[in-house]
Image (tube, rainbow, N blue to C red):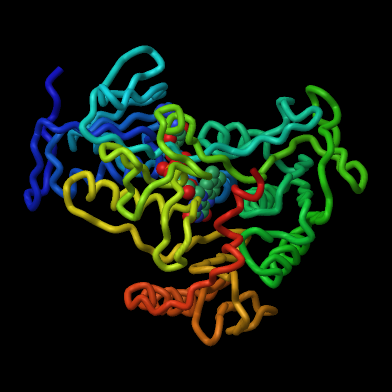
């Protein structure tokens, strides 16, 4: 079958014979494929994903999609015809099993081999599993993929008793969505408060109170020890007694998919190790997104981020570097979370602050906390205060540009080491 002619930006043409293979058709992989074409890459682009869906966004899976306010077709990152129209060979249900660096080709699980001039690893993360008695039962859910979300959505219904294990972003978003759908929800968190890995106690307490107001039972300092009831879940055994539940959702973090890189001999340390140009130790192999451990020029430390912002910006930077346009990946990390009517927006870091300046009114549900050290802004958490958030983000970006940031050295920013800590 003839391949469609790629739509290319003529600013920067590359040899049409070059081939870029992208492993992982998630946010970073898709973004990289799009950016290659937009920036004039004229060669072959193969985007390989082991899921059955064209590239889609994951954030709504715990939010509007779970409550039924967003349909599947609104999740897709590009319209169905986009990939072929831009000469991007999208291979779905295809798992890359091996990288042969010497022959410069990858091998799919069915045996097919595809050669590359440049390879981009955008393999993302997978949900961290809990190894407890009863944890493999059919009523114990995880949420990472569209398939997971479809399965979970079917099970969330008014009156159902849902226990969430983990009071991090994903657990709390699922709790909010399930409570909104009329379920009876309990959040079980091993730490003393919610969101401890990603923000300050003030924000964790604000969200704990918001969940309680919506009828969610929040149990902190509580560990799950078993899932009881066999095929039909009856309860969770915890260090504070049993919690009745028909369904459990585990949200205890994610593990980077590095095995492919590791087997190929590429250095990995809580992620595939790359430099600021998204290069691995092999000059023909790049990596981007949740799966990378990369240097952050602003924080002056290595990070592994799990955010759309990182996947988009790093995927784009990797594509530009592959296309021969040297581009450093240097960004202020930012993130958001929606729970009920609250939108939490966060940028920078809270680690190492010696002062918190509060804007707005916590009681009104619209406020921002500015984290500073020696008068220099380090980060912001804003709840329903987009203007304050944008101003702080702008200020952080200026610091990044000017290289003036006071950077926290110790302790290492907690929000960026979540997976390392839990490992
Ligand atoms: P992924 O999107 O995980 O894509 C990697 C893809 O590679 C996957 O499809 C995987 O199956 C595939 N793959 C792996 N190995 C292979 C292989 N060997 N062969 C073929 N394919 C392979 N971020 C935010 O910023 N804000 C939010 O509000 C937010 N909410 C979220 C809610 C949920 C429920 C989840 C799960 C995530 C959320 N995130 C959020 C995180 C965000 O979605 C991720 O940071 C982002 O998807 C990372 O993109 P990625 O391309 O690096 O990885």
Q: Quadrant of residue 358?
A: bottom right
Visible in this render: residue 69? no
- In the drawing, does residue 116 fall left or right of residue 245? left
Q: Where is residue 103? Give x, y as percent.
A: 25, 22
Q: Where 94 falls versus 243 (above or below)?
A: above
Question: Seen from this angle, which residue lies furthest right?
Answer: 241
Q: Residue at x 92, y 44 (%)?
A: 241
User: Image quadrant for the N terminus?
Assistant: top left
- Return the x and y of residue 281 as percentages of the image width and height: 34, 41
Q: Quadrant of the C terminus?
A: top right
Residue depicted at x 71% and y 32%: 140
Name the residue furthest top: 111
Q: Residue, x 27% and y 32% (percent of image)?
A: 21
Q: Is residue 281 left or right of residue 89?
A: right
Pick the residue in front: 417 or 382. 417
Does the image show residue 351?
yes
Q: Foreground residue, 184 or 61?
A: 61
Where residue 348 appears, as percent x and y from the top left, is: 49, 69
Residue at the image point whose x is 30% and y is 32% from the top? 47
- To which quarter of the image does residue 329 belong? bottom left
Residue 125 relative to residue 26: left or right: right
User: Where residue 272 appears, x then y in whole percent?
Assistant: 44, 42
Name which quarter of the figure residue 91 lies in: top left
């Amino acid at each position: 079958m003839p391949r469609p002619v790629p739509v290319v930006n003529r600013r920067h043409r590359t040899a049409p014979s070059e081939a870029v293979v992208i492993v992982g058709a998630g946010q970073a992989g898709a973004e990289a494929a799009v950016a290659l074409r937009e920036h004039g890459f004229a060669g072959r682009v193969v985007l390989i994903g082991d899921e059955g869906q064209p590239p889609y966004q994951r954030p709504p899976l715990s939010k509007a999609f779970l409550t039924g306010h967003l349909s599947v077709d609104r999740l897709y990152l590009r319209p169905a015809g986009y990939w072929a129209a831009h000469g991007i060979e999208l291979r779905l249900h295809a798992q890359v099993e091996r990288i042969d660096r010497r022959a410069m080709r990858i091998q799919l699980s069915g045996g097919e081999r595809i050669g590359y001039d440049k390879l981009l690893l955008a393999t993302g993360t997978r949900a961290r599993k809990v190894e407890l008695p009863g944890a493999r039962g059919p009523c114990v859910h995880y949420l990472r993929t569209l398939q997971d979300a479809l399965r979970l959505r079917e099970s969330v219904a008014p009156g159902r008793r849902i226990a969430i294990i983990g009071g991090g972003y994903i657990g709390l978003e699922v709790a909010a969505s399930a409570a909104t759908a009329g379920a009876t929800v309990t959040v079980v968190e091993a730490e003393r408060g919610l969101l401890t890995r990603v923000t300050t106690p003030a924000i964790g307490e604000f969200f704990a109170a918001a969940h309680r107001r919506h009828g969610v039972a929040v149990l902190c300092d509580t560990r799950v020890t078993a899932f009881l009831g066999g095929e039909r879940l009856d309860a969770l055994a915890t260090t504070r007694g049993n919690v009745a539940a028909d369904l459990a959702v585990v949200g205890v973090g994610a593990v980077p998919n590095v095995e492919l890189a590791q087997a190929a001999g590429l250095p990995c340390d809580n992620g595939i190790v790359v430099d600021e140009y998204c290069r691995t130790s092999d000059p023909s192999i790049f990596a981007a997104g949740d799966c990378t451990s990369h240097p952050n020029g602003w924080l002056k430390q290595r990070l592994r981020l799990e955010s759309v912002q990182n996947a988009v910006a790093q995927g784009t930077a990797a594509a530009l570097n592959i296309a021969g346009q040297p581009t450093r990946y240097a960004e202020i990390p930012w993130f958001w979370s929606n729970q009920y009517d609250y939108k939490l927006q966060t940028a920078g870091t809270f680690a190492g602050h010696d002062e918190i300046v509060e804007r707005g009114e916590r009681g009104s549900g619209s406020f921002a906390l500015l984290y500073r050290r020696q008068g220099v802004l380090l980060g912001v958490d804003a709840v329903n205060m987009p203007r304050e958030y944008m101003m702080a983000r702008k200020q952080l970006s200026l610091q990044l540009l000017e290289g003036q940031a006071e950077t926290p050295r110790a302790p290492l920013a907690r929000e960026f080491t979540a997976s390392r800590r839990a490992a």
